[in-house]
Amino acid sequence: MKLFDPTSGPAPKAALELAPRPSGLAGLRLGLVDNTKFNSDTLLRKLAERLDRRHGATVTVTNRKRSPSHEIDEAGVRALRDAHLVVSGIGD
């Protein structure tokens, strides 16, 4: 008879390197990802308007997921590469 121990120790911590933060938002291109939850599109639209009005950041690409649990398709990922910052919206 073989016995398997289903327990394990904590996962090893991988080094995480964050992207550098911009010094400001003026002139930056924003990408928006709407996850299709209720009000996600409204939240993102209002955020984009406020960032444009207050900081001069403009939305250059918007992507809408099929559902909250689906990933963005490859074409959507390529389009987001033109943005300096990407905001993924939630709703509810």
Image (tube, rainbow, N blue to C red):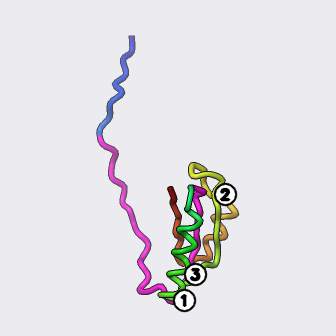
Find the residue positioned furthest to the left: 9
Tell me which segment is drawn in magenta. Answer: 10-37
Amino acid at dot 1: Gly
- The residue tagged 2 is 73
Residue pointed to by mark 1: 27
Distance of mark 1 from mark 3, alpha carbons?
7 Å
Residue underneath mark 3:
29
Asked whether disc 3 touches disc 2, contact meaning CB atoms under 8 Å apart, the reply is: no
Q: Main secondary structure of the magenta part?
A: loop
Q: Which amino acid type is marked by label 2?
A: Asp
Q: CA distance from mark 3 to mark 2?
A: 20 Å
Kind of residue sitting beneath label 3: Arg
Residue 9: image location, x then y, percent: 29, 38
Q: CA distance from mark 2 to mark 1?
A: 27 Å
Picture coordinates of residue 86 (x, y %)? 53, 71
Q: Label 1 neighbourhood size at 10 Å, few (<14), some (14-19), many (20+)?
A: few
